[in-house]
Each structure stands twice: as structure tokens, then as C-alpha cells.
Amino acid sequence: MSETSDGDDGLVVELSRAARRLQRPDSETEALQLIVTGAVDTVPGAEQAGVSLLHRDGGITSAATSDATVDEVDQLQADYQEGPCVTALREQHTVMVDDLTAETDRWPRFAPDAAALRVASMLSFHLFTRDDTVGALNLYSGIPRGFGTESQLLGGLFAAHAAAALGGARHVAQLHRALATRDVIGQAKGILMERFELDADTAFQLLARSAQDANMKLVAVARWLTRAETSDERDT
């Protein structure tokens, strides 16, 4: 087998391992943490990782980090509004920096402060664009030129898998919330049907009218009713 083929096989193996790490997270928070952990384990040269979000108002926040140093570096980029992460977020493309000490003209405030925290090189990937929020995966190395061509290739593939996993986790979380909402409304309808001898449609209309009169969300009224019913049952 040729050297190129061996390299390709290695990338496939690493990416398959990364994909397995990201399968079926229980929540978006867990997915984010799996992403930063998996990136460090998967991408050559990556010693630390973080996921940052650019919001509609221009603010930047850290969604997940591998350690406290990344928290500090990400906060510097958010405060200064400059750095590889900010460029990746705003321009939505991959940014690789071989040596931050040589980037003081490009990022005059961020580069020296990040170098002082012993971050020498960075690799940032656009992760997703969603609901007026843009995400980026940021990788950090303590040595200059810590990332190479393989890092860019494997990191880009990992970021694509990560974005899909995160979208799936968010969808699952939304589904869980929707099912929980449906269940509590169903319980409230059942209480009204039994208490007032109503059919399902009439019970729902009564629930909806009560929510409208009280200027509350339907699910909030349903939760109140089910809690009140549970309290009554305990008291009897």
C-alpha cells in the first residue's frame, strides 16, 4: 500500500473513532463537551479546544472549553473582538495561525496576551450557522506551527461531524421538551375531563380559555393544574 493510501486509511480510522464519540449525546451541553474532548483526542497537534458562539448582537460567548486556559483565551477574544476565533466566526472559514507572536499587527491586543498564556498556535473552524448564532471550533497548541495539513483536513472533517451531532442533540432536546409539554397538557385535560365530566375537546378549550384569561402560556396553566391536583391528592 502506498504512503498516501496509508495516510488516507489513518484519517478514516481517526474520523470513525471521532464519529463514534459523538453519537447520540443526551443533550446539547453534553454534545458540546464531547466535541471539545473529541477534538483534542482526534486532531493532530491539538492540546486544548473550545467552542465559541457569535450572537446576533455581536457578543461572543464560550459554549464549552477543555480547561481554564481556554476560558481565558476565549474571553480575551470576546473582550477584544479580535483573534482567530473571531475571524472564523465573522468570515465563516478556517483560520490557522502558526505563531501568535508574529501576528501582533493583525491582532495587536489579543496576540501578545494569548502568547503570555502560552498559546503559540491556533486552528479555528466555522462550525455552524443557526438561529442568528454562528459557532466556531477552536484548537490550541503550546508550540509554534503546532498544526499542519493533516490537522486542517482531519479538523475540518471532525467539525462537520460535530456540527451534525450538535444539530441532532438540539433536535432531540427540542423533541424531549415537546413531548414533556404534550404530556403535561394531556394530564391537565384528563383532570378537567374527570372533574367536570367533559369530553377531550371541551377540556382543551377550557384549558386554553383559562390560559388566555390569565395571560399565561397554556403549558404553564397545565403545570399549575397538575401540581394542584397532586397536592390535593396528598392532602386527602
Image (spheres, rainbow, N blue to C red):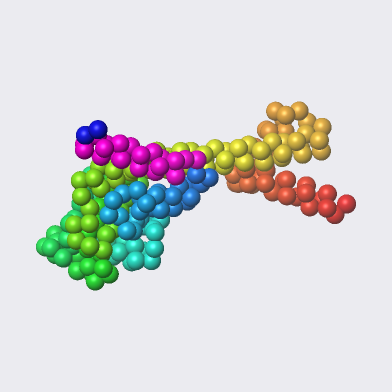
Q: Quadrant of residue 109?
A: bottom left
Magenta region, main secondary structure: helix
Residue 46, x across and y down, in percent: 30, 55
Q: Residue furthest right?
A: 236
- Using the image, determine if residue 138 lies above or below residue 196: below
Q: Residue at x 39, y 59 (%)?
A: 66
Q: Which of the two residues, 24 or 108, is positioned nearer the viewer here?
A: 24
Residue 169, x across and y down, in percent: 48, 42
Residue 95, x across and y down, in percent: 21, 50
Q: Which of the two residues, 123 or 203, is positioned nearer the viewer here?
A: 123
Q: Is residue 183 visible?
A: yes
Is residue 11 on the magenta stretch?
A: yes
Q: Which of the two residues, 19 or 183, is positioned nearer the viewer here?
A: 19
- Using the image, determine if residue 199 lies above or below residue 14: above
Q: Is residue 116 left or right of residue 159?
A: left
Q: Residue furthest bottom?
A: 116
Q: Quadrant of residue 192?
A: top right
Tag count in the figure?
A: 0
Q: Which residues are magenta?
A: 3-24
Q: Which of the two residues, 49 or 12, is positioned nearer the viewer here?
A: 12
Q: Residue at x 19, y 61 (%)?
A: 144
Q: Is residue 2 left or right of residue 196?
A: left
Q: Residue at x 48, y 38 (%)?
A: 171
Q: Is residue 86 visible?
A: no
Q: Residue furthest front?
A: 1
- Using the image, determine if residue 84 lies above or below residue 91: below
Q: Residue at x 25, y 33 (%)?
A: 1
Residue 163, x across and y down, in percent: 37, 41
